[in-house]
């Protein structure tokens, strides 16, 4: 029976005044009844437009039809046919600009809550079903994967299921990449990520941590000394960008990478249980308007900052962050200082940040990105008293692999040049995908690149 409600079944969540003081997950997930009710909003369109918006081509109407019938495990297995990390994607994918943006129900109301249903199905499976995973017999071919983020994990899983001996090399002490160091616990519980990684290990994937390719081991040595037949580079975009203004070296000024890594991967939010102190002053300014900026601001609030500001040089409509993240940030007491641009940081006589000079902006004509270009309003300089700043204006790939590898082409931004459909690079038997190719993007796009590369690697090594 079709549910004709124009709006999605609401997702239960913590009260904003409570959740902004803890790192527990903000949204608590659908009950079985809620999931079935939401699934019955799906019209099961013959053309399946929602699938066109999914980078990993999940069979969305089919899995939702199972949910509508209460067949939750069948729904999970349908998703797993193409998506290796459904519990992750159900939480962090920007469904509103991908699958849900194509949903027919969105024409006269809200789309079906595809992401919410994906999360429900994955959580149901984790709670009720013990995975039985058998290692596939080896086909005699070896593939190295550089980086254990969403792209690398996807390649590793897809190839292991085809009998390849896969070794993943991770620079940090814990596998998971951006899923572990970048996304806060209240958006993506880390035990979910580790559960998926444990399943990969059961498939036979070997994960080596504390290995920096380009330093600990050179990329060429993976072929010459370790005997790999192909290498996939999914090392992400972990090099922070800075604004190049005065005072960026003051104490109290962080890159978003350092700030979030200390809090998430190094468990700074559990200090002193974990010996990772994170300095948070009374007033924190986060510079930027993307999801990383929202994550940093919401973490700062949870760590006790009285005032937290998002400082962004464009307006509300131009914010690149997900609408849900912006809404949650506002509910939690984050103040948005829009059409505002920092010009310098000002410190005290001991080298600590004490305030930031900013200017007001107005929007002019569209720039190359299609967004209206921010233009400084002359004479609008003013001071914002802060003692902590987090710079969240973007990341680029670490240049280490490029600098230590001959024949690997990159563009002017330092991203590896790779074929969009196969991930092939300029270097023989070397593939790449995810943020190391595109620059900072989404989890699901990185996974899509990983799936495409796995297909291409298998085709090449099977010939």
Image: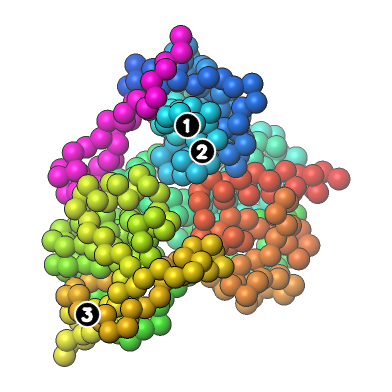
**Camera-nearest label, 2 or 1:** 1
Residue under the image location 57 percent in, 32 percent down: 50
Answer few, some or many: residues within 10 Å of disc 2's Cα (few below 14, many 20 plus, some between 14 and 19): many
Q: What element carries label 3?
A: strand
Residue at position x 45%, y 28% from top? 108
Q: Which residue does the numbered mark 2 point to in the structure image?
A: 101
**Quadrant of the rendered image containing residue 379:** bottom left
* Residue 124 vs residue 68, the one in the foreground: 68
User: Where is the C terminus found, in terms of image quarters?
Assistant: top right
Q: How crowded is mark 3: few (under 14 residues within 10 Å), some or many (20 or more)?
A: few
Residue 12 counted in the magenta span: yes
Q: Name the residue under label 1.
A: 106
Numbered label attached to residue 444? none
Q: Distance between the residues labelled 2 and 1?
A: 7 Å
Q: In this view, does 427 lie above or below 6?
A: below
* Residue at image location 33% in from the left, 68% down from the top: 339
Q: Which residue is drawn at 46% across and 9% down?
A: 1
CB under 8 Å between discs 2 and 1: yes
Q: Which residue lies furthest to the bottom in this view?
A: 349
Identify whether 87 is placed above or below 130.
Answer: below
Quickly name the residue at label 3: 382
- Percent x, y of residue 277: 22, 65
C-alpha distance separating marks 2 and 3? 40 Å
The residues bearing labels 3 and 1 have C-alpha atoms spaced at a distance of 43 Å
Query: Which numbered disc flags the more N-terminal residue, 3 or 1?
Result: 1
Q: In which quarter of the image is residue 382?
A: bottom left
Residue range highlighted in magenta: 1-30
Query: Pointer 1: residues within 10 angstroms few (<14), some, or many (20+)?
Result: some
Rendering quarter of residue 340:
bottom left
Disc on the earlier residue, 2 or 3: 2
Dominant SS in magenta: loop
Q: What element carries label 1?
A: helix
């Amino acid at each position: 029976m079709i549910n004709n409600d124009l709006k999605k079944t609401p997702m239960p969540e913590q009260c904003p005044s409570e959740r902004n003081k803890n790192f527990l997950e903000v949204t608590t997930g659908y009950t079985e009844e809620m999931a079935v009710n939401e699934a019955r909003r799906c019209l099961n369109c013959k053309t399946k437009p929602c699938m066109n918006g999914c980078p990993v081509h999940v069979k969305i109407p089919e899995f939702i039809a199972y949910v509508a019938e209460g067949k939750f495990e069948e729904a999970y297995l349908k998703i797993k046919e193409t998506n290796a990390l459904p519990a992750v994607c159900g939480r962090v994918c920007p469904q509103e600009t991908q699958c849900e943006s194509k949903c027919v129900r969105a024409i006269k109301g809200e789309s079906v809550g595809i992401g919410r249903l994906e999360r429900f199905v994955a959580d149901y499976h984790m709670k009720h079903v013990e995975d039985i995973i058998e290692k596939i017999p080896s086909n005699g071919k070896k593939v190295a994967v550089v980086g254990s983020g969403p792209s690398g994990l996807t390649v590793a899983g897809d190839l292991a299921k085809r009998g390849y001996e896969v070794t993943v090399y991770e620079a940090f002490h814990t596998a998971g990449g951006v899923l572990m160091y970048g996304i806060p616990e209240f958006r993506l519980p880390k035990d979910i990520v580790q559960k998926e990684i444990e399943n990969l290990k059961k498939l036979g994937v070997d994960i080596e941590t504390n290995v920096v390719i380009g330093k600990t081991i050179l990329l060429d040595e993976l072929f010459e000394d370790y005997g790999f037949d192909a290498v996939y580079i999914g090392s992400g975009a972990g090099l922070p960008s800075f604004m190049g203004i005065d005072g960026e070296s003051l104490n109290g000024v962080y890159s978003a990478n350092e700030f979030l890594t200390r809090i998430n991967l190094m468990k700074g939010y559990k200090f002193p249980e974990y010996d990772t102190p994170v300095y948070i002053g009374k007033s924190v300014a986060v510079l930027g308007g993307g999801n990383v900026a929202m994550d940093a601001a919401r973490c700062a609030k949870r760590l006790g900052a009285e005032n937290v500001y998002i400082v962004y040089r464009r307006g509300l409509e131009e914010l690149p962050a997900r609408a849900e993240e912006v809404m949650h940030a506002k509910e939690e007491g984050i103040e948005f200082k829009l059409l505002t641009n920092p010009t310098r940081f000002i410190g005290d006589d001991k080298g600590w940040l004490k305030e930031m000079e900013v200017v007001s902006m107005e929007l002019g004509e569209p720039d190359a990105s299609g967004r209206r270009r921010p233009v400084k309003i002359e004479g609008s300089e003013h001071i914002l008293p802060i003692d902590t700043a987090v710079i969240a204006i973007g990341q680029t790939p670490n240049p280490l692999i490029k600098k230590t590898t001959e024949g690997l082409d990159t563009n002017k931004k330092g991203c590896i040049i790779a074929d969009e459909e196969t991930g092939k690079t300029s270097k023989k038997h070397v593939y790449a995908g995810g943020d190391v190719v595109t620059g900072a993007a989404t989890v699901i796009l990185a996974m899509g690149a990983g799936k495409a590369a796995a297909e291409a690697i298998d085709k090449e090594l099977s010939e």
